[in-house]
Image (cartoon, rainbow, N blue to C red):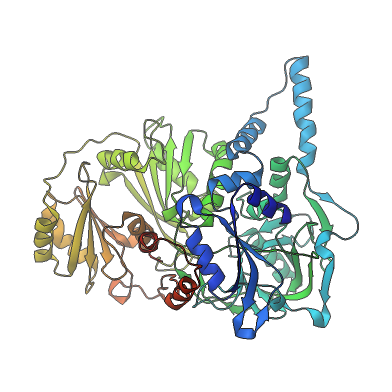
């Protein structure tokens, strides 16, 4: 962390805040606002964090937004992201050498691979200079942040969670939010699809306690590796060695059999009793919504250790764009070669930030035969973390660059055909709130790999169209048309819902000459002219099996909050929103510097 601070300072990528700033809401709110600025703003170092509620001043600085820009990502990787992807591609396609020169070259490459494997050191590490054992254990000695006012408590948000299978043969490094219950207990939010949860099942069946060690800080790349979607059983720290060209140096935990990086800033060790669970949450998550209360396993802490001068690393999640945008970009680029091993005709893929990763993916492919795109859809929804993706658009090789959104949207809408919508069902992320049943919900695939040039509709002005719509659907309160130049323009309507919107859509079907894609959103909390946040809202709120309607060339999408009117009986979570009083206080102290236009655009 100290090296990271020096690097970011040298590169003018760090803002140091010496004012006393509270770990309750204030520090997270400032980090949340900073990453909304152009190019992700700066990394933030808070040198005087305080806990006003309990009258505590910490002598440990808090570092945030370290990965929060493309440039900072590559600084922390120590190389370009594309160079990592190229190296993986080369390894995957390595062939037997044909001559002496080729053999010598391969020997050099293979010799360098010895640095991939983590190295276990003898003795203790820098992370164990300060020790808190038995009655001295106290999680509240760390400046752990409470990010949002409806959160269930303080949460560790950038913890490296180290676990192992019961036989010790497999180890895993994951990143899960960790709720602080009291001085000695920490919630383990590993979802049922995660590797740590698979290990937990083994201990639960055997009736044995499970060891867990959580590291915070050290080389930031450990934290990124914890998010990497590697296959089950593959140690994520192998990636660290591949990227850094040196092995991760590990030391043994004091009270568990797990190994952690010797240069971590904090280490929290403990044991999970598989027969006991606690209510975890709520938590304002990266979807921009709160995830609801649910029972999860928890750790009883057996030791806390740290460096002599630790730095506490944290992140903030909520509405996009956030730090995870840039971490996800690195993952997207680096794992493209691995994804291609299962899908060799894949050219590229992209996860737009306002699709919050698992809600929207764009994929470009080389189409070779009829039904190829549908085959890809099945493949994506059956591959690791890709299986959580709710909505996917598949394009052919002639499509524009996947990040050129204006050109891409035109290309998609000019080729769109409702007959090529593919709706199915599969597993959903535990954070998804829109499906009728937790963990299982609708999937939407859109195949625009083949040209389907349709005749454009007869366009009306927004006001004229609104009048026609309101005669059929009086619950519609506002209307704006997007992509009017395309053959399938999009009409977004705000509603005060009083009946299932499928009924409204059916009534509107007589306007098929004027409307092609009709999107319904709630009047409350939506700005009909803010396309960025409308996409965020809609892909969060729809389940394809329930909320997509088709009538000839016309398609309806219900992006509203669901309730009993829709036959929806789960609890619907609230938006993650900043506390207005906290922002006002930060403004008065000269700490809040976010432009008001950005505040409104990103609906803070």
Query: Does the image show residue 451?
Result: yes
Query: Does the image show residue 233?
Result: no
Q: Residue at x 46, y 46 (%)?
A: 378
516 or 32: which is nearer to us?
A: 32
Residue 192 in the image: x percent, y percent?
58, 64
Residue 188 in the image: x percent, y percent?
64, 70
229 or 68: which is nearer to us?
A: 68
Picture quarter with the C terminus: bottom left
Residue 249 in the image: x percent, y percent?
81, 51
Locate residue 59 relative to residue 458 in the image: left or right. Answer: right
369 or 315: which is nearer to us?
A: 315
Q: Residue furthest right?
A: 123
Q: Image height check: is 178 above or below 598?
A: below
Locate residue 358 relative to residue 202 in the image: left or right. Answer: left
Q: Residue at x 48, y 33 (%)?
A: 345
Picture quarter with the N terminus: bottom right
Q: Residue furthest bottom?
A: 54
Q: Residue at x 80, y 32 (%)?
A: 111
Residue 556 in the image: x percent, y percent?
24, 56
Q: Image height check: is 130 above or below 153?
A: above
Q: Image height check: is 56 above or below 240?
A: below
Locate residue 205 relative to residue 386 in the image: left or right. Answer: right
Tally the marks: 0
Locate residue 72 relative to residue 35 in the image: left or right. Answer: right
Q: Residue at x 66, y 63 (%)?
A: 159
Q: Quadrant of residue 425?
A: bottom left
């Amino acid at each position: 962390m100290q090296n990271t601070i020096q690097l970011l300072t040298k590169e003018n990528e760090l803002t140091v805040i010496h004012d006393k700033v509270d770990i309750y809401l204030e520090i997270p709110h400032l980090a949340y606002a900073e990453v909304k600025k152009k190019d992700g703003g700066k990394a933030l170092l808070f040198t005087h964090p305080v806990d006003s509620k309990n009258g505590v001043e910490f002598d440990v600085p808090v570092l945030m937004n370290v990965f929060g820009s493309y440039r900072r990502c590559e600084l922390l990787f120590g190389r370009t992201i594309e160079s990592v992807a190229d190296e993986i591609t080369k390894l995957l396609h390595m062939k037997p050498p044909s001559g002496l020169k080729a053999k010598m070259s391969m020997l050099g490459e293979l010799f360098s691979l010895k640095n991939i494997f983590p190295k276990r050191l003898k003795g203790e590490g820098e992370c164990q200079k300060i020790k808190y054992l038995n009655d001295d254990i106290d999680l509240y000695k760390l400046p752990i942040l409470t990010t949002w006012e409806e959160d269930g408590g303080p949460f560790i948000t950038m913890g490296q969670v180290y676990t192992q299978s019961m036989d010790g043969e497999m180890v895993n490094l994951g990143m899960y939010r960790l709720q602080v219950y009291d001085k000695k207990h920490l919630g383990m939010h590993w979802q049922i699809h995660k590797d740590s949860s698979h290990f937990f099942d083994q201990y639960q069946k055997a009736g044995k306690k499970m060891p867990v060690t959580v590291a915070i800080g050290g080389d930031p790349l450990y934290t990124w590796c914890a998010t990497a979607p590697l296959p089950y059983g593959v140690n994520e720290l192998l990636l660290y060695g591949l990227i850094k060209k040196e092995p991760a140096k590990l030391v043994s935990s004091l009270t568990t059999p797990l190994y952690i990086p010797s240069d971590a800033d904090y280490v929290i060790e403990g044991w999970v009793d598989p027969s006991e669970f606690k209510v975890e949450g709520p938590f304002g998550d990266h979807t921009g919504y709160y995830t609801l209360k649910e029972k999860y396993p928890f750790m009883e802490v057996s030791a806390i250790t740290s460096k002599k001068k630790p730095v506490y690393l944290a992140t903030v999640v909520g509405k996009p764009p956030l730090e995870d945008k840039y971490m996800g970009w690195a993952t997207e680029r680096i794992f493209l070669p691995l994804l291609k091993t299962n899908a060799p005709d894949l050219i590229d893929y992209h996860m737009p930030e306002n699709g919050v990763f698992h809600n929207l993916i764009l994929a470009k492919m080389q189409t070779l035969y009829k039904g190829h795109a549908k085959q890809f859809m099945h493949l994506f929804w059956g591959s690791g973390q890709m299986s959580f993706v709710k909505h996917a658009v598949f394009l052919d090789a002639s499509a524009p660059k996947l990040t050129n959104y204006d050109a891409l949207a035109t290309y998609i809408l000019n080729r769109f055909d409702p007959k090529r919508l593919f709706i199915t069902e599969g597993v959903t992320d535990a954070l998804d709130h829109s499906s009728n049943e937790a963990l299982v919900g609708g999937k939407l695939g859109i195949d625009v790999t083949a040209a389907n040039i349709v005749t454009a509709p007869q366009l009306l002005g927004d006001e004229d169209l609104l009048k026609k719509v309101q005669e059929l659907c009086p619950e519609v309160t506002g209307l704006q048309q997007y992509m009017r130049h395309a053959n399938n323009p999009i009409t977004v309507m705000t509603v005060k819902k009083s009946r299932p919107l499928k009924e409204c859509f059916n009534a509107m079907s007589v306007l098929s000459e004027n409307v092609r894609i009709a999107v319904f959103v709630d009047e409350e909390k939506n700005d009909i002219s803010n396309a960025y946040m409308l996409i965020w809202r809609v892909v969060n709120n729809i389940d394809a099996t329930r909320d997509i309607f088709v009538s000839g060339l016309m398609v309806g999408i219900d992006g509203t909050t669901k309730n009993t009117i829709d036959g929806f009986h789960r609890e619907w979570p609230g938006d993650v929103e900043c506390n207005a009083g906290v922002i006002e206080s930060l403004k008065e102290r000269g700490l809040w510097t976010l432009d008001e236009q950005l505040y409104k655009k990103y609906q803070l």
